[in-house]
Every structure is written in C-alpha cells, then in structure tokens.
Image (cartoon, rainbow, N blue to C red):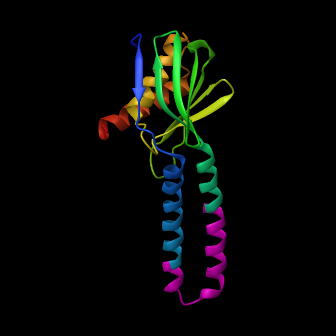
Amino acid sequence: MKTENIIKIGHPVISFFERVKYYISIYIGIISLFGLFYAFDEGRKGFLSFILFMSLVFGLFIIYKIYKTKLYLTDFYSDSYRVEICYLNCSEEQTILSTIEKIEIKLKNTSSRAGFDCEIEIIIDNKKFIINDDFDWGFSEMKTLFEYIKSHKQEILTEKEKFIISRIEEKLKRTPF
C-alpha cells in the first residue's frame, strides 16, 4: 500500500439542521409508506399496531443515526506527522490539531441485504467521528484516509480490514462515484 506524505480531504459544510432534515425526511417517507398500506388494508385492527410498532423502531433508528452525526468531520489534513481535523459539533465549526500517532481508526463493515456498506470510526482527543457515505464522503476517500493513517502509523492491516478494503475496491469498480 503506497501512500503520499500529504493528504488533504475537504468537504462543504453541511449544518446539523440539514443532516437532521435528511434523516427526518427518510423517516417521514417510511411512515407514509406504511400509512398507504394501512389505507388500503381491509383488516385494520392488527395493522395499526404494526404501524405504531414500526414507527417506534424506525424512530429509534433515526434518532441513533442523528446522534452519530452530531460530530461531523468535514476536512482532514496531514503531512504524515501533524494532523488538522476540521469538524462540526452540531453546527459549530471546530478544529483539532494533533499528531497522527494519537489517532485511533477502525474500519467497520455495515453491510446488509441491501448491499455493501462500511464506515470508518476515528477517535482523537476523546471525540468519536463516524465517517460513512450518507453525506459527502465517498468510498474512495474513506479508503484513502484509512490506508493513509494505517500506513503512517505503521500498523499492519488485519485480514478483516483487507477484506473490507477489497469490497470497497469492488464497489468502486462497479460504481466509481
């Protein structure tokens, strides 16, 4: 794995309100879909309970997703030793200056029956950033960032990490954006 000495990844700022609005619109869409099923269902007694239960389940899932995006990493710059991370804490822009040795990074496979998906978890200065492809980050940038940090910390990739990276590469071949 060959990596450059300098990495700079930047994204436009997406406010916390915009991130919340994204997840709320998904929730409303799901609930509306269940509502349509309810409107055309003949035996409505048990179906209303089902809709309420599913609303609660999806509501909790959406709240969890919103909580995970409270800290949103927008920019990452490193010269292989020093690291500058710009992020949003809700909608307030903040910066962390540190060294690459103080970063803990994990690559997680979050795939489901819907297809391949993954996320990167970065922990620095007791702050946990979850990077996924829900907003601006793409698989290519996620792979580049993960390999860069692992390489410059001189950490060897585990078999699980190699497998996830190979899945990312396969996904990039099919859909390069």
Quadrant location of the N terminus in the rendered image: top left
Magenta residue check for 99 = no
Residue at 43% of width from left, 37% of height from top?
A: 137
Main SS class of the magenta portion in the image:
helix
Q: Which residues are magenta?
A: 36-58
Taking 115 as reference, is 128 left or right? right
Q: Quadrant of residue 12?
A: top left
Q: Position of residue 39 (x, y in %)?
A: 51, 85
Q: Position of residue 122 (x, y in %)?
A: 58, 28
Q: Position of residue 61 (x, y in %)?
A: 62, 55
Give the residue furthest to the right.
Answer: 126
Give the residue furthest to the front.
Answer: 92
Quadrant location of the C terminus in the rendered image: top left
Residue at 53% of width from left, 78% of height from top?
A: 35
Residue at 53% of width from left, 60% of height from top?
A: 24
Q: Position of residue 103 (x, y in %)?
A: 60, 20
Taking 136 as reference, is 23 left or right? right
Depth check, front residue: 58 or 127:
127
Q: Relative to 6, does residue 73 appear above or below in the rendering?
A: below
